[in-house]
Amino acid sequence: MKEDSYTSLICANFCNYYKPGKDREKCGGYFYIKQFITPAELGDLIEVFKLKSYEASYRNCSFVCEKCDFRVDGCDFFVNKSPNPCGGYLLINRIFHYTNF
Ligand code: SF4
């Protein structure tokens, strides 16, 4: 189940595929962020690094997709290599980029 504090930061801000009210499933990015970062820390990271909802390129973070509830129904980014990942994937990608992980 999602939590509003994370959903507003991750899904509403960063995900092109987000549909309010669908709170049972979460992407792999949401899973990992919720495990390791508090909503306050995430908000600070977004503000300090000026993280945006769109980036032209992405590093491979396929481990994120391994924990994703949406893979069951297929994900265009994961299956067909479409250009736009979900917001959780995008956010983890940008955090890694700015922290040189
Ligand atoms: S890019 Fe697709 S498979 Fe990967 S975490 Fe996001 S929704 Fe899930």
Image (cartoon, rainbow, N blue to C red):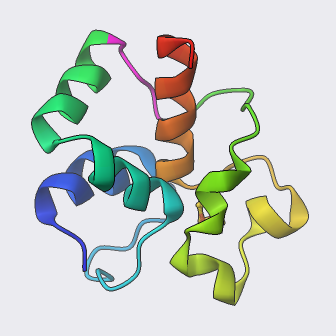
Image point (27%, 11%), residue name: 48
Question: From the image, which quarter does the N terminus lie in?
Answer: bottom left
What residue is at 53 percent from the left and 25 percent from the top?
A: 96
Q: In this view, does 90 lie to the left or right of 72?
A: left
Report the number of discs: 0
Please report the residue visible at 82 percent of the width from the left and 55 percent of the height from the top.
82
Magenta span: 49-53
Q: Is residue 36 left or right of residue 51?
A: left
Q: Position of residue 77 (x, y in %)?
A: 76, 59
Among the 4 quarters of the image, the one containing residue 72: bottom right
Asked if the magenta segment contains residue 51, the reply would be yes
Name the magenta segment's main secondary structure: loop
Residue that lies at the very extreme toward the right in this rendered image:
80
Measured as percent of width and height from the top left, residue 68 is found at 56, 71
Q: In which quarter of the image is residue 58?
A: top right
Q: Which residue is drawn at 41% across and 23% down?
A: 51
Taking the image in four quarters, ligand 1 sits in the one at bottom right
Side (left or right) of 35 relative to 101: left
As displayed, is residue 53 above or below residue 72? above
x, y (%) of residue 24?
32, 86
Q: Along the horizontal axis of the image, is 42 left or right of 100?
A: left
Residue 49 in the image: state x and y as whole percent.
36, 12
Seen from the viewer's position, the closer of residues 13 and 72 is 72
Q: Which of 87 and 29 is in front in this view?
A: 29
Determine if the magenta segment contains residue 21. no
The quarter of the rendered structure image containing the C terminus is top right
Depicted 61 relative to depicted 101: above or below: below
